[in-house]
Amino acid sequence: MTLKGIESFTIKTYHTDRFGKACPATFAAFFEEAAANNARLHGFPGEYLLQHGIAWVLSRLTFTVDRYPNIGETISIHTWPSAHTPNLALRCFEAFDAENHLIAEGTTAWLVIDIKKRKLVPVPEFVTENYPHSNPPCKEFPTRAVPRLRNPQHECPLISRKADIDTNGHVNNVRYLGWIQESMPEEFIMEYEPVLIDISYRMECGAFQKLTSKSGGTDDGDYLHTVSFDETGRELCRARTEWRKRQHVDVPYLQHHI
């Protein structure tokens, strides 16, 4: 039997964007919460790893969104661990609305780090021993690796904050979802919404770091993104997004706010 985790979330005002809908970072945050609770069900919660001086870190996140829920809607997130290797563990996600329609689905890849040394280590035995072997596979990543942005067209300065730091001592992965979109043109964001987000996490980040978010369109009509350290130029993450035209929404705040 598949030991799926099922978590219900109601979309609050602080989960939404200017259009009154959940944003990509909302899905990422819900995925993370559901994953943490399901890991407890399987016997390898994040707290137990921390007691052993290690922690889960997200290596890659990809998900597609059929519909972004509105303020007040309640959705359910289904998650389960799938395949693993000695150094990598996969986890699957599905999001359903109140009518049980599938509105989003995704896949994550997780690594384990030594907290003190800040180095990758193999997935511990107490995890692999409890890891289910008959769970359904995750949806495959859209590409073998997230392409690198070579011709940036837009960029925006950023700075990481103390409020971004999580229990692992670095900026939480959810924050990156906002960062990659910061450099997108305002007129584009007003007309389009992301239908696919595929992000590869390459380095961790602490507080008070000066960063730059860059993006650029491709010949296929999608966008590539990167966030890098200003001081060294090294990439924190790279991402690819696909977009669709928004349905027209009247938002009084946008019409009258100065």
Image: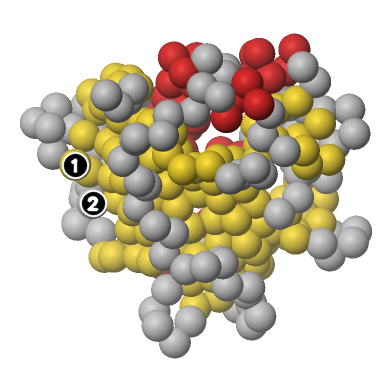
Q: Compared to 243, does 107 lie above or below?
A: above
Q: Compared to 54, does 160 lie above or below?
A: below
Q: Position of residue 45 (x, y in %)?
A: 57, 17
Label 2 packing within 10 angstroms: few (<14), some (14-19), many (20+): some
Q: Is residue 26 left or right of residue 88?
A: left
Q: Position of residue 202 (x, y in %)?
A: 71, 54
Looking at the image, which is closer to me, 135 or 8?
135
Q: Which residue is mark 1?
A: 102
Q: Residue at x 57, y 29 (%)?
A: 128
Is residue 238 at all visible to an observer of this figure? Answer: yes
Q: Position of residue 167 (x, y in %)?
A: 71, 21
Q: Are marks 2 and 1 in contact (CB under 8 Å)?
A: yes
- Determine whether the residue tagged by mark 1 lies in a helix, strand or loop: strand
Looking at the image, which is closer to me, 256 or 87?
87
Q: Which residue is mark 2?
A: 66
Spatial CA distance of label 2 from label 1 is: 8 Å
Q: Earlier in the sequence, mark 2 or mark 1?
A: 2
Q: Looking at numbered disc 2 in the image, what kind of residue is underneath it?
A: Asp
Q: Looking at numbered disc 1 in the image, what kind of residue is underneath it?
A: Leu
Looking at the image, which is closer to me, 69 or 205?
205
Looking at the image, which is closer to me, 28 or 155?
28
Label 1 packing within 10 angstroms: few (<14), some (14-19), many (20+): some
